[in-house]
Amino acid sequence: VIIKLGTNDTKPQNWIYGKEFFSDYVDFINEFRKGPVKPQIFISYPCPVFQTVWGIRDSIINIIIPIIDSVRKATNTDLIDFHTPFLNSDSLFPDGVHPNADGYLKMAQIARDAILNSPSGIIRTFNSNKYSFDKGESCKLYWETTNGSEVTLNGQHVNGTDSLLVTLTETKPFTLIAKGQDRSDTMHIVLNYYPPGRIKSFYAKPRMLELGANDSTKIYWAASKGSQVFLNNMPVDISGSLTVSPSSTANYSLNTSGDTTDSKEITVQVLPAEEINRSLDRNVYSSSFAKYFPAVNAVDGNPSTFWKSKNEATPWIYVDFEKEINFERVVLDWGNNYAISYRLQAVSASNVITTIYEKTNGNGGKENILLNGSGRYLRLLCTQKLFADSGYVLKEFEIYGRGKVTEVVNETNSVQQFELFQNYPNPFNPKTRINYSVSTLGNVSLKVFDILGNLVAILVNEVKQPGTYEVDFNPSNLSSGIYFYSLQVNNSIKNKKMIILK
């Protein structure tokens, strides 16, 4: 991370807060160090100012530089000097403040040299190709440190840059320490071992069903390799799922045995419709999210977590109920940066969007809103926020309603056609969902191509039973543009267009 502050602080309207420059800078650095990733942080001297324009003054730059040096010492960060190398280079700053292309190139070269010549005692990376494994499986640890570092792994001396194949019979922590002349760096990894007989996961989704609606839920489980597994005392595979339709609240137990034994129990509640938060644990998507604050936080039933959007004009968040719902009520529990204006939109399975509620004078807090509409999805579209320089904060997005009554077809429960549906959302960023159905057992492939016909992703390539399926597509490595997705079932092909906006 390279932080370059100071130039705009020299403006008179900003420098009146000059006494806060040191503390604000330190707080800024500490924010980067709060997350699980511990980056190497460089702070930098600002470029010289050759002409006083827009209130930017070189006299204040000369006051700021010693303060930046104090920040560097107080926070143990590294320094990039963008000031001294440019003192006699006014030709690289046509307006006296901003560098031209040659000036930016020189800045990039200075930054590159600083990074490549970092002092010893810094860990660049320390990770594993997997963090949990079953009996007989192995994983590989990788690490890289700066040149000249004295490095130990769990107390044993190792090369500064290397890898290690690991096979364990128990959960074990690994600690990498790099020591240099004036600093040291430490990172930790825990590798989790699952002996035969250990339950890895056991849950139902959704956890609550509507009383009298003949609703169903899916129970999912996974155990370690070599386990004997029993669901409600019946033998099952080590991992799988089961659809159940209890008429009243029911308990389900999973028991495993092997080198160890394990047991867990879950409860599926059957409740009146008005008591069911339909969004709880449902699949949820958003236009963006700030680091560590994903959309799933808004549907986890925990008001101490929250979704925070990036600082964009009209972010959205929507919940997929996987079937049509008649919406009756929504509870929006806002955080400190709430929406003053927003819309609630019902979206059908065929992507027809209907605004069923709109507000233009929101006051935040917990809003309890009565609705009248139906859809497979419910989307919250935010259009104006309290603080313009930050993302929206939503602690909980609770949705209440009833399953929509549909006509029952007695002849068959099978899908009667081979169909590829339009992805939603579209256009999209960062991800979208594609639904398709097949009517017969067969080979199914779902592929994505760019506008030139180049294959860019394979989403499905396997034999599928008759049914309806959905696939999430997250093209983090693709640029904005038009793409096509193609579904082939045996010898039949259907294509549709999607648009990525980044």
Image (spheres, rainbow, N blue to C red):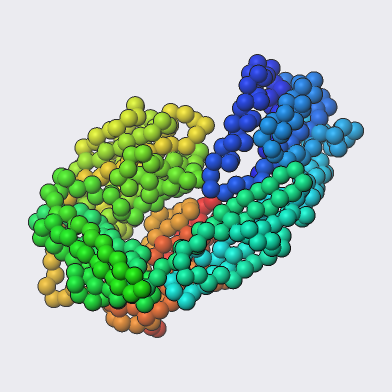
Q: Quadrant of the N terminus?
A: top right
Residue 59, above or below 107:
above
Residue at left offset 49%, top offset 43%: 290
Residue 164, above or below 44:
below
Residue 178 horizontal/vertical position (percent): 68, 53
Residue 384 horizontal/vertical position (percent): 42, 32
Residue 311 visible from this viewpoint: yes
Residue at left offset 50%, top offset 70%: 168
Residue 477 falls in which quadrant of the image? bottom right
Residue 374 visible from this viewpoint: no
Residue at left offset 43%, top offset 55%: 426
Residue 242 horizontal/vertical position (percent): 24, 69
Q: Nearer the viewer, residue 21 or 262?
A: 262
Residue at left offset 35%, top offset 44%: 298
Specify whether 74 is left or right of 389: right
Residue most extreme to the front = 155
Residue 349 horizontal/vertical position (percent): 30, 58
Q: Nearer the viewer, residue 196 or 105?
A: 196
Residue 332, above or below 40:
above
Q: Nearer the viewer, residue 162 or 355?
A: 162
Residue 85, above or below 190:
above
Residue 303 falls in which quadrant of the image? top left
Q: Nearer the viewer, residue 20 or 461?
A: 20
Residue most extreme to the right = 88
Specify whether 190 is left or right of 45: left
Number of marks: 0
